[in-house]
Amino acid sequence: MKAALVLEAGKAPVYGDFPDPVPVPGGQIIRVAACSLSHVTRSRASGSHYSSQHALPFVPGIDGTGVTSTGERVYFVLPQHPYGGMAELCLVEERHCIALPDGLDPQLAAAIAIPGMSSWAALVERARLRTGETVLVNGATGTSGRLAIQVARHLGAGRVIATGRRPGEELRALGADVLVQLTEDRDALEETFRKVFHDGVDIVLDYLWGPSAETLIVAAAKAGAEGVPIRYVEIGSIGGRDITLPGAALRSSSLQLMGSGMASVALAGLLQAVAGVLQAAPSAGFSAAIKAVPLADIGRAWAAADSGSRLVLVP
């Protein structure tokens, strides 16, 4: 079969031939329809992700959509190493396959499953969102953040606040009530965040971490209502891997810090979150900017900068 191949850690995959997967008990051979080029896929391929497997060569791609040997349309996740989603075929445990609802485009499903799961799992499994609560999405301009706005609304958030370097009005169309522009002036940003928390925030979904998280946490500690918990869920760290956390921010507030991702949420919970996103997508109208790229162009796709579109590889 044709596939993208990681031959050396840290190097871009190349397009070539790879042995077809062989059926095993409890496994499904999937004819792949689409595979998303996600941050997790990139970091696992480079060997830098905490869930990376290092045996070479292998096919990258932790999830995708396709058709089983019996003709069922499915979303799949965590193919069995060395078979990933960026190939014509892959091998997946049956328990890691989720039926696609009628009317859901396989490319859209591949594009939204993991980014949509990130907010769904954070809100349901970690923060325990209650109907009518206010959710702040820190880093709402990327694919995951935009979906977080839509997922929060679908799950019952009464108010959504979206932050970003250039948060446009299109975020309001997705369900954001308030837009906050992240600026280089930290004092000005803290003042803006203090006003936001004074008005009430129940949950923070943070895709950035880094300096903006430091400012958010300090503002929450200073302006949050006394004794009212603010559930702060760290999901991504594209704004910085580390922060400086003042102890007083925890002593003087009801801030609850937690993370959401592999291991902090059991695999069964993550799969349930993906299923929730996919089942809701047709009726909720979940949307994402998608750019489909032929698998043969994996080198060009791998090198592409983040353009705001979700790259989906199509065999």
Image (tube, grey):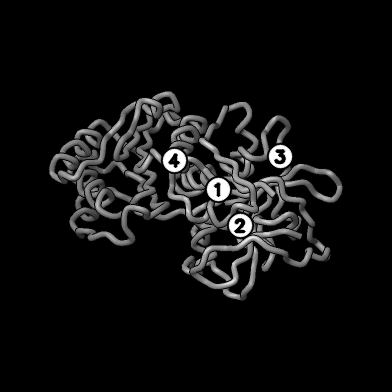
Asked whether disc 4 touches disc 3, contact meaning CB atoms under 8 Å apart, the reply is no
Q: Earlier in the sequence, mark 1 or mark 3?
A: 3
Q: Nearer the viewer, mark 2 or mark 3?
A: 2
Look at the numbered disc 2 and give the secondary structure of its residue: loop
Marks 1 and 2 in Cβ contact (< 8 Å): yes
Label 1 – label 4 distance at C-alpha: 16 Å
Mark 3 crowd level (few <14, some 14–19, many ≥20, 10 Å Cα): many
Q: Is residue 305 left or right of residue 202?
A: right
Per the model, the C-alpha gap separating discs 1 and 3 is 14 Å
Viewer-closest of 112 and 35: 35
Residue 134, quarter of picture: top left
Estimate the x, y position of residue 113 in percent, counting from the top left. 58, 44
Q: CA distance from mark 1 to mark 2?
A: 10 Å
Residue 265: x and y, percent? Answer: 52, 56
Q: How far apart are the two marked residues, 2 and 3, measured between alpha carbons?
A: 17 Å
* Residue under pointer 1: 114
Asked which secondary structure carries label 4, the reply is loop
Q: Pointer 4: residues within 10 angstroms few (<14), some, or many (20+)?
A: few
Q: Quadrant of residue 24?
A: bottom right
Q: Which residue is mark 4?
A: 308
Looking at the image, is mark 1 or mark 4 earlier in the sequence? 1
Query: Closer to the camera, 206 or 227?
Result: 206
- Image quadrant where one finds the N terminus: bottom right
Identity, as a three-letter code, of the amino acid under mark 3 = Leu
For the image shown, how many numbered marks are present on the structure?
A: 4
Residue 13 tag number: none
Residue hosting label 3: 100
Q: Which residue is mark 2?
A: 62
Callout 3: SS: loop
Q: Is residue 128 shown to the viewer in this render?
A: no
Disc 1 on helix, strand or loop?
A: helix
**Please, which residue is most extreme toward the left here?**
187
